[in-house]
Image (cartoon, grey):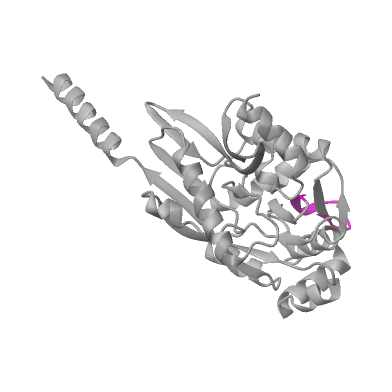
Amino acid sequence: MTSNQKYREFCNKEESMPIFVKDWWLDAVCGEKNWDVILIEKDGEIIASMPYFKKRMIIFDIITMPKLTQTMGIYIKYPKNQSYVKKLSYEKEVVTEIISKLPRFHIFFQKFNYSLTNWLPFYWAGFKQTTNYTYVIENLSNLDTVFFNFKKNTKGNIKRAQKTLTVISNDDFRKFYEINKYTFKKKGVEVPYSLKYADLIDKACSKRNCRKIFFAVDKNKEYQAAIYVIWDKNSMYYLMGGTNPNNENQGANSLLVWEAIKFASTVTNKFDFEGSMIESVEKYFRTFGSIQKPYFKITKINIKIFYSFKKIIKKIFRKKII
């Protein structure tokens, strides 16, 4: 049995695995043949895994992140009732072995789930780390408390939006994508993923009943905003969103987020805004009383390979001049 086959069975058994490292998610965002996985086994049981997305660019082998995938990284099955000291030792052993099994690469780039807080083995192996942030509402058991923790302006925007907008949910993904594009058009950039690519994700999530699309509609039946959320056993994730450029109701998106949070409380435990390093977006996510969660972006570049490549280019360039 191949590592991928073992991993597919492992994913079916491990309900607590984040959605972004599930085999079916990787099939959708990477393509079935474009991802692989490192497995650590003990006594015939998988105790840790790290899937990775591999690309070939010119002559370079690259391990990177697929689009619309917040994090990947390492998933570890910890022994029960493990002390903190033993947990750190266990992590060091597991992560060090995973690093030793990494395939040959020129560039490595992965974002790790915030549950992994110990990246020291990567540091010792010459990798670099940048801290990113997401925002999470950690407890959805009491929605009154959740709403109470919203910033005053956010509460007001939601209440005003409720008077003029209706929230609906349906499976019209093409309509969602149309609204989603406005987010990028407003910034003057192209949508970084095609309808075909995003539709593959939608079909995969729809098949497993772990996605929902919310729309804000006005009295004229015009769509004013939309958000797309997915979830696993642990959390719901704000994957995509968009607002109609003609929308004058500033609370439309906040209303949709609130409806998504209420729905999240019926299917999972947390709500993850998926964060942003953009100041204005970060400020908006904070208004929902969410908790800041740091997570790691781990990178490594094989410098020697790049120096060699530069020398080759220079030689070719000189020959052309001569």
Q: Position of residue 22 (x, y in %)?
A: 69, 40
Instruction: Report which quarter residue 303 is drawn in.
Output: top left
- Magenta part of the protein: which range? 216-232
Residue at the extreme front = 43
Q: Is residue 19 above or below residue 32?
A: below
Residue 104 highlighted magenta (yes or no): no
Q: Is residue 173 above or below residue 131?
A: above
Please state the total of marks drawn on the protein image.
0
* Quarter occupied by the C terminus: top left
Residue at the extreme left = 322
Identify the residue at horizontal 75%, vertical 67% (top origin). 251
Q: Is residue 9 above or below residue 254?
A: above
Q: Position of residue 146 (x, y in %)?
A: 79, 73
From where the camera sits, is residue 205 visible?
Answer: yes
Identify the residue at horizontal 70%, vertical 73% (top origin). 289
Instruction: Report which quarter residue 50 is drawn in.
Output: top right
Q: Position of residue 34 (x, y in %)?
A: 57, 28
Residue 223 highlighted magenta (yes or no): yes
* Front-lying residue, 106 or 224: 106
* Front-lying residue, 69 or 221: 69
| 127 relative to 232 in the view: left or right | left
Q: Position of residue 136 (x, y in %)?
A: 68, 64
From where the camera sits, is residue 243 visible?
Answer: no
* Front-lying residue, 247 or 171: 171
| Most common SS among magenta residues | strand
Q: Is residue 244 above or below residue 175?
A: below
Identify the residue at horizontal 71%, vertical 47% (top origin). 179
* Quarter occupied by the N terminus: top right
Identify the residue at horizontal 44%, vertical 51% (top origin). 122
